[in-house]
Image (tube, grey):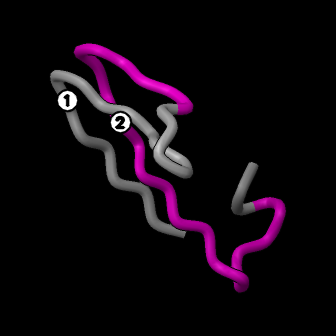
Amino acid sequence: MVAVIQRVSEAYVKINHQIKGQIGIGYMVLLGIGQEDTLEDID
């Protein structure tokens, strides 16, 4: 599992050309979960 935290002035998530979520100033977390990660890792 890898997590990257980045301070942003704005951020959004776009799925199929539609914005599904957005924030203004704040923190964005990019989280990568692999097949080898367990439920305990995710918790």
Q: Residue 6 lies in what quarter of the image?
A: top left
Residue found at the far left of this picture: 9
User: Which quadrant: the N terminus?
Assistant: bottom right
- The question of residue 30 being in magenta is answered with yes
Horizontal placement of 4 versus 33: left or right?
left
Q: Describe residue 6's horizontal placement relative to residue 42 as left or right.
A: left
Q: What residue do we see at 20% from left, 32% from top?
A: 7
- Measure the alpha-carbon separation of dots 2 and 1: 7 Å
- Sooner in the amino-acid sequence: mark 2 or mark 1: 1
Q: Which residue is mark 1?
A: 8
Task: For mark 1, give the secondary structure.
Answer: strand
Using the image, determine if residue 38 lies above or below residue 41.
below
Residue type of the residue flagged with mark 2:
Met
Q: Amino acid at mark 1?
A: Val
Instruction: Tell me whether the residue at label 2 lies in contact with that at label 1, contact meaning CB atoms closer than 8 angstroms.
Output: yes
Identify the image quadrant of residue 13.
top left
Which numbered tag is attached to residue 28? 2
Element carrying mark 2: strand
Q: Which residue: 34% across, 53% down? A: 4
**Hey, which residue is sitting farthest bottom in the picture?**
36
